[in-house]
Amino acid sequence: MIHPAVVRKQRLILISLIGLTLLTAFIGLGLGSSGVSYREIVPTLFGRASFDDSFILYGIRLPRMLITILSGMALAVSGAILQGITKNDLADPGIIGINSGAGVAITVFYLFFPIDEGTFSYILPAVAFVGAVVTAVFIYVFSYQRKTGLEPVRLVLVGVGFSLALSGLMVILISSSDDEKVNFIAQWLAGDIWGTSWPFIWAILPWLVGLIPFTLYKANRLNILGLHPNVARGVGLAIERERLTLLFTAVALAAAAVSVTGGIAFVGLIAPHLAKSLVGPRHQLFLPIALLMGGWLLLVADCIGHNVVPPDGIPAGVMIALIGAPYFIYLLLKK
């Protein structure tokens, strides 16, 4: 049973994170050369503003922010799942190579297949999912040992190796391509959020609407997977089946996110850790907080990066890496 005081604390944190996200979005709408005047934001939201302000808000700023928030949520939940099923605090879809697998699939699709502008945004998450699944299967096979099972440290090392190899493969694939396609892949590698229009939101939304509630439903299974295997089996849990189901869920969430944001790492590492430090390690408690934390962190990174060095700014993936890489090293030394 969860103590009522902890539940109250969780609700207070959730309300605070929603408020922080709305405040950050409001501030972000007014920043930059194409920002909307703060006095005009509320009238524009209700359709009482000029055409220019409406176009900037609904055509440029709002879709980008929603994509950023949704992708951050997906990456945070994906990271929490991976940490739960591997019992490894260093697991993250970007660090262990899943994002790079999705990136290779996107690169091959973008370079060698005919692209229909009407369906491109909807096909991309599925393409990324296929690449991420193939990569995850290889990482799982190379990390698993019959006697000891899935070894956490081995998983990270194998994943980092796959991530580096697949990133190198992407560079090789674009080496003979034209400049426009090279720029797109380079943008993806840097984690520069590029899918900033409404079709991309409708493309990834069904993945999140289906998979995030499913993960919350599986929260207690994730708690049990954190116990000793004999205990988990003793309560009737089919360990390998649950691991594979949740692994595919994590891969799908990460693939949907990176298909429109590029290769962003560390969100799935940082958000679950911060959530656990606030309310403890029970998944029922920290998963909703990690969900909102991931969206807010990526939104902050994009708002800062997009405006700190005009006109092009710094990719959100680079801004997150500036925070996440030292934190990753700290966890590596601590564990």
Image: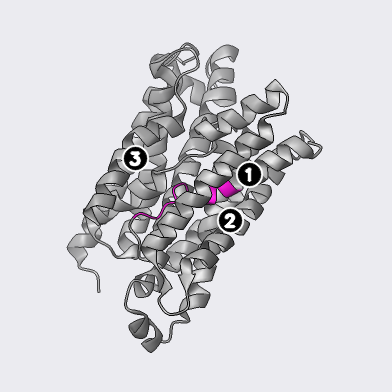
* Total numbered labels placed on residues in the image: 3
Q: Does residue 1 appear left or right of residue 210 in this picture?
A: left
Three-letter residue code for mark 3: Gly
Please state which of the two labelled residues, at mark 3 or mark 1, is closer to the viewer.
1
Q: Report the residue marked by disc 2.
A: 135
Please state which of the two labelled residues, at mark 3 or mark 2, is closer to the viewer.
2
Q: Report the residue marked by disc 3.
A: 324
Three-letter residue code for mark 2: Thr
Q: Find numbered disc 3 in the image and state the secondary structure of the residue it sits on.
A: helix
Q: Is residue 92 magenta?
A: yes
Disc number placed over residue 104 in the picture, else none: 1
Q: Is residue 6 above or below residue 62?
A: below
**Place of residue 17 in the rendered image (x, y in percent of width and height, measured from the top left):** 32, 42
**Place of residue 162 in the rendered image (x, y in percent of width and height, measured from the top left):** 52, 51
Q: Is residue 236 magenta?
A: no
Q: Residue at x 37, y 80 (%)?
A: 229
Quarter in which the C terminus is drawn: bottom left
Between 35 and 76, which is closer to the camera in this rendering? Answer: 76
Q: Is residue 107 above or below residue 159?
A: above
Q: Quadrant of residue 194?
A: top right
Quarter in which the N terminus is drawn: bottom left
Q: Does residue 110 appear left or right of residue 230 in this picture?
A: right
Q: Which residues are magenta?
A: 90-101
Q: Quadrant of residue 9?
A: bottom left
